[in-house]
Image (tube, rainbow, N blue to C red):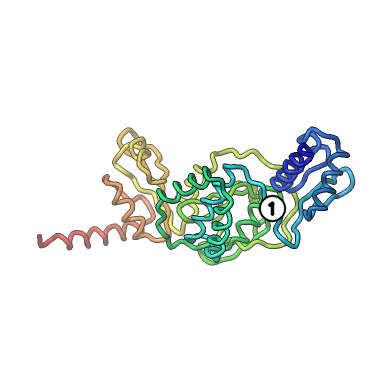
Amino acid sequence: MLETSARLLKLLSLLQAHKDWSGPELADRLGVSTRTVRNDMERLRSLGYPVHATPGVAGGYRLGAGAALPPLLLDDEEAVAVAVGLGRAAGGGVAGIEESSVRALAKLEQVLPVKLRRRVSALNAYTVQIPGTVPSVPPEVLTTIANAARDHERLRFDYTGHDGSVTTRDAEPYRLVHRRGRWYLVAWDVERRDWRTFRVDRISPRTPGGPRFAPRELPFDVAEHVERGVNTAMWRYRARVLLHAPAERMRGLPTGMDFEPVDEHTCVAHVGGDDLNGIAVWIGALGVDFEVLDPPELAEVVRGLSERYRRAVSDR
């Protein structure tokens, strides 16, 4: 009986971790026969879990949505991650889930083992969150994208550009990236036949989504790809500035910018932003001499700032 119970827990964990499983795949994972898998599925159904079965060669098992939330199985690391994530969500960042996050966190902490509760408490006690002003994202949008990426299903959505224009996109979603308060989607754009990075707060998913796709191998480091995209194409303005400092020295600063070497003494910084004044101030804060290459509007903003700074100290 103990062996059967342990196997049921393992089976439930597998069903919760992946959307679709074939009978032979589950039998191989559990080290049992496909007949035993079928019997175990019936036991789960008798316990109230909505397990759906599809016959045929392409068929398999799927854990569906029931009338009530069934118990979830989490290992130690998953439990800590969920608890910390709920704590962050309670402080904002995802639209409309602050109160729900507090309630869920209270329930989770009530059943956490002492050793895990101490880990969560330590992380929360020694972590400081600074509220931001970036756009929040509805939680259902994040879950829709995450589920499509997990199940290798195309995602159709309306996307709002910097100029307010809306286009319909068909993409293969791969990764969600959270960077400085904003969410980004890294996906293969089917129509443009290239990798693209989308701001999630500008995405409005369409239902139903597209068909399943065969996963591609990511040809880049996701974090670096998003960082590079955010600093250039993701913004309303894109600037190139010649810095009188070597690229290696500038890359050692936590700027997130892309630096292109020119020679051993200079490099070109590629930076983007929604506000030219912000770009000018950010470049000035690097602490090195620079020349604005483009756009011309940035040069005018820098010139205006220099006059303002000069007047601020001209009488002292």
Quadrant placement of the C terminus: bottom left
At which x and y percent is residue 240?
39, 49
Residue occupying the point 80% across, 39% down: 1
Closest to the observer, 204 or 67: 67
Residue occupying the point 56% across, 62% down: 103
Q: Is residue 198 above or below residue 11?
A: below
**Kind of element beneath mark 1:** loop
284 to the left or right of 232: left
131 to the left or right of 171: left
The crowd level at tag 1 (other Cα within 10 Å; few <14, some 14-19, many 20+) is few
Residue on which the image places disc 1: 71
At which x and y percent is residue 252?
36, 38
68 to the left or right of 112: right
Three-letter residue code for mark 1: Pro
Q: Is residue 116 above or below residue 306?
A: above
Residue occupying the point 55% across, 47% down: 81
Residue occupying the point 49% across, 63% down: 135
